[in-house]
Amino acid sequence: MSRIIQKEWTVRPSYFAVKTQNLIRNVVENIKMTPNPNKKYITLSIGDPTAFGNFQPPESVLQAIRDSLDHPSSPNYGPVIGFYEARKAVAEYSRRQGKVKPEDVILCSGCTHAIDLVITTLANSGQNILVPRPGHTVYKTAAEGLGIELKFYNLLPDQNWEIDLEDLENKIDEATALIVVINPSNPCGSVYKAEHLRDILQIASRNRVPVLADEIYEDFTFSGHKFTTLSSLSVDVPIITCSGITKRFLVPGWRLGWLIIHDRNNILGDDIRKGLCNVASRLLGPCVLIQRALPAILESPQGYFWDMMKFVETQANFACKQLCLCPGLRPITPQGVMYMMIEIQISLFPSFKDDVQFVERLLMEEAVLCLPGQCFGYPNFMRIVLTVPENILTEACNRIMAFCQQHCSGLKMKEELLDVTVAKPIIREDLLTTA
Ligand SMILES: *Cc1c(COP(=O)(O)O)cnc(C)c1O
């Protein structure tokens, strides 16, 4: 007879599994309202430009995968940090970041995995990482299960979402392992000037904290705004830049990203590089089919991308003009990316407690779904996606207007400022000429 250890079945999820949470999923799953069945459902919540069918990856990107499939060893395992050829292609593609060698590149299963690798390699349980608020939820998901604390530094909506530098520096303590900078930003659509990036680097340098630069939206800028890669400005601060093909090449489902180590003063040293490789070996490297296609993907002509950005900019201008006229809303003009944050002046909506209730009722009455700011740690805002087809965005703005007119208590006062034709769609032509 063998020894009985337990008389009852008790199979429990690990601490890690319980503590690993996705804020967007949690908030959205908790929205109990169903969309008004009498209106066509419009979702402005999905951060995937390919979700609506109006944007597709270019043919050269698709062909690269077909060719990869025909490679004689296409089903074989690849190296855990990626094929040298593919890493070389990323180094070449990223040369404006500074001197990048293939040895500095690790290929990952999406940018999310790159972020996960950096956090698990640089931080221990009990340490903290500094992340922007509002900011993308991927950081919370990656860190909390590991017992790594998130500390939020504030962004300033009235200064185009620049970082509150004083707040950032105040949040650094002995246990801070990493500062995360997301530029250009999801959800804010901000694009930082070089000057601001230099200020951030000075804080990191003074306090000796390495930086994770999330640059998955590199070059997603509107006219008049220029993207600067953080690492190109760094003298001493070690920077690990995370990016990938998801957004730029319109293939979110293909799951290919990377991290690039910039360590000019050899501060991270071989230990961190080795640590990153160790952790990468947990997943045995990203999909080989995509890795082999990577050099060709990265060389794809970019006409489709600049066309998309022009379209998104037009959409941003349109949505801004329209939503500015909605009583109780204050859209913050984005400088790039494909999202816009809108402040809900909640005190003007006496029937709603917060952004989640506002979004729920908007869904119930007007069948429009926006993401509540709480998904990004930022209540009383909501985020909309600008890549939806034009007619859908126009219709959504009209419905949001009707909704605000109905529920905003400040309407009477605001009405005097408004044109009486306000509820009608603004004519698109005059907007297109300004784009
Ligand atoms: C989409 C996104 C990611 C994740 O990209 P994947 O390649 O899909 O994993 C990371 N950071 C930000 C800011 C994003 O918007």
Image (spheres, rainbow, N blue to C red):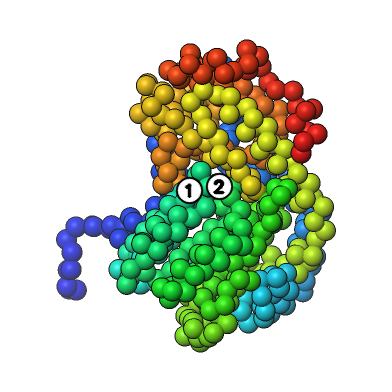
Q: Mark 2 and mark 1 in contact? Answer it, CB < 8 Å.
A: yes
| Residue that carries the numbered disc 1 in the rendered image | 156
For the point 63% across and 65% down, which residue is it? 229
Residue 74, percent from left and from top: 71, 71
For the point 76% across and 69% down, which residue is it? 295
Determine the image quadrant of residue 26. top left
- The answer to whether one can see residue 81 in this image is no
- In the image, 77 versus 207, the foreground residue is 207
Residue 203, percent from left and from top: 46, 68
* In the rendered image, the vertical position of residue 181 relative to residue 133, given as above or below: below
**In the rendered structure, which amino acid carries the disc numbered 2?**
Asn
- In the image, 133 versus 192, the foreground residue is 192
The quadrant of the picture showing ligand 1 is bottom right
Instruction: Give how far apart the Cα atoms at labels 2 and 1 are.
Output: 7 Å
Crowdedness near tag 1: few (<14), some (14–19) or many (≥20) residues, C-alpha within 10 Å: few
**In the rendered structure, which amino acid carries the disc numbered 1?**
Leu
Judged from the image, the secondary structure of the residue bearing numbered disc 1 is: strand
Q: Which quadrant would the N terminus be assigned to in this image?
A: bottom left
| Residue that carries the numbered disc 2 in the rendered image | 160
For the point 66% across and 17% down, which residue is it? 424
- The answer to whether one can see residue 192 in this image is yes
* In the rendered image, the vertical position of residue 65 relative to residue 22, given as above or below: below
Judged from the image, the secondary structure of the residue bearing numbered disc 2 is: loop
Residue 82, percent from left and from top: 63, 75
Q: Say left or right for 262 vs 293.
A: left
Q: Which quadrant would the C terminus be assigned to in this image?
A: top right
Q: Say left or right for 244 vs 188.
A: right
